[in-house]
């Protein structure tokens, strides 16, 4: 039996209740009956017997001291109500030791300020809420602040943009460790998307199309594209389906999603291929065809550039049918 994946939620006064809830919802809820992995989430603080106060009269009750970080596979730092809240020295020291051991660290929203206080972001790329970017740059000039990502990784340290982007990062970390289907199972339970494309630039300005008519047309064209991923799809063809010129369609699509039509299509095809690799024993050429890549070579190139792995390696890591010969046929798993 595989040991549960160990996640440490680092707690100290001033952390945001919303981020605590996100971390708890993703890793603290037992969904093994739905096929999700087993997690061991621990609330870690300097003193396990002392409640950690949060805004709104809430309190978090730790169940482990900072020493437990040495056992964790992942350490997650919530954001802060006051983004300049100094973390206690024992917390900063524990985070430094965890990174030195090679443990994956992740910070949600203003949690990037805590990692920066620990010196862990000096010389590294990081992101935070778009409204805090200038403050992070001013307070920690050694950090290379990326302004428009939803989340970013540098040297096994992950940071996320504001609020909902913390959900994106948590689900991505599940996907990275356990596969797309595990992340999708959790996302379905949370009634959220398993991943969003684009950057937080879409939320800074022009977050939605200018007219409801355009929004409806774009929703319909995305649904059409998802039903026909296995077919050749072009921007001109999708624009025609939406009743727009190609230029107008591309502009409205990018404003609505934060990404271009072609990049969105590629994201959906990669996600479709991941699901097929996890759920079926289809031969690689057939996976490529059904996901709309056209050829195994093209699929392999996109996996390498976007996921830093190959389709075969991905299947070996995450498939429920791993070890079944590719010629054995196909048996999709319905959920």
Image (spheres, helix red, strand yellow):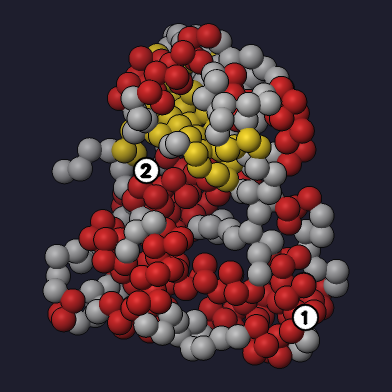
- Confirm whether residue 253 shows in the render: yes
- Image quarter where the N terminus lies is top left
Other residues around mark 2 within 10 Å, as few (<14) / some (14–19) / many (≥20): some
For residue 247, the mark is: 1
Task: Give the x, y percent position of residue 144.
Answer: 63, 35
Left or right of 98, for residue 111: right
Element under disc 2: loop
Instruction: Name above or below for residue 254 compared with residue 309.
Output: below
Q: Nearer the viewer, residue 239 or 141?
A: 141
Task: Provide the residue designation for mark 2.
Answer: 30
Task: Give the x, y percent position of residue 145.
Answer: 66, 37
Left or right of 13, for residue 106: left
Q: Nearer the viewer, residue 124 or 114?
A: 124
Q: Residue at x 27, y 73 (%)?
A: 280
Instruction: Name above or below for residue 195 compared with residue 289.
Output: above
- Confirm whether residue 79 shows in the render: no
Element under disc 1: helix
Other residues around mark 1 within 10 Å, as few (<14) / some (14–19) / many (≥20): few
Task: Give the x, y percent position of residue 204.
Answer: 78, 50
Give the foreground label among 1 and 2.
Answer: 1
- Image quarter where the C terminus lies is bottom left
Quadrant of residue 152 within the rendered picture: top right
Q: Nearer the viewer, residue 187 or 266?
A: 266
Q: Residue at x 32, y 64 (%)?
A: 310
């Amino acid at each position: 039996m595989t040991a549960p994946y160990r996640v440490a939620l680092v707690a100290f006064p001033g952390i945001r209740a919303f981020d605590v809830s996100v971390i708890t919802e993703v890793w603290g809820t037992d969904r093994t009956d739905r096929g999700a992995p087993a997690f061991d989430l621990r609330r870690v603080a300097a003193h396990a017997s002392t409640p950690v106060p949060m805004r709104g009269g809430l309190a978090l009750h730790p169940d482990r001291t900072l020493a437990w970080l040495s056992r964790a596979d992942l350490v997650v730092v919530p954001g802060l109500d006051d983004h300049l809240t100094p973390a206690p020295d024992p917390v900063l020291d524990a985070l430094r030791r965890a990174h030195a051991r090679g443990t994956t660290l992740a910070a949600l929203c203003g949690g990037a300020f805590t990692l920066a206080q620990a010196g862990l972001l000096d010389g590294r790329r990081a992101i935070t809420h778009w409204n805090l970017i200038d403050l992070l740059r001013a307070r920690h000039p050694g950090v290379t602040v990326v302004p428009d990502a939803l989340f970013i990784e540098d040297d096994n340290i992950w940071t996320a943009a504001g609020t909902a982007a913390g959900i994106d990062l948590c689900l991505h970390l599940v996907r990275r460790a356990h596969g797309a289907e595990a992340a999708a199972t959790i996302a379905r339970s949370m009634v959220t998307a398993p991943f969003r494309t684009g950057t937080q630039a879409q939320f800074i300005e022009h977050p939605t199309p200018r007219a409801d008519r355009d929004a409806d047309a774009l929703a319909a064209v995305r649904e059409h594209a998802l039903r026909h991923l296995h077919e050749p799809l072009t921007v001109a063809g999708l624009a025609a389906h939406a009743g727009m010129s190609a230029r107008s369609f591309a502009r409205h699509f990018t404003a609505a999603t934060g990404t271009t039509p072609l990049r969105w299509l590629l994201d959906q095809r990669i996600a479709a291929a991941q699901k097929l690799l996890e759920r079926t024993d289809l031969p690689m050429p057939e996976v490529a065809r059904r996901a709309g890549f056209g050829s195994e070579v093209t699929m392999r190139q996109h996996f390498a550039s976007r996921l830093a792995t190959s389709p075969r390696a991905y299947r070996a890591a995450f498939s429920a049918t791993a070890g079944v010969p590719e010629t054995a046929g196909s048996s999709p798993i319905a959920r």
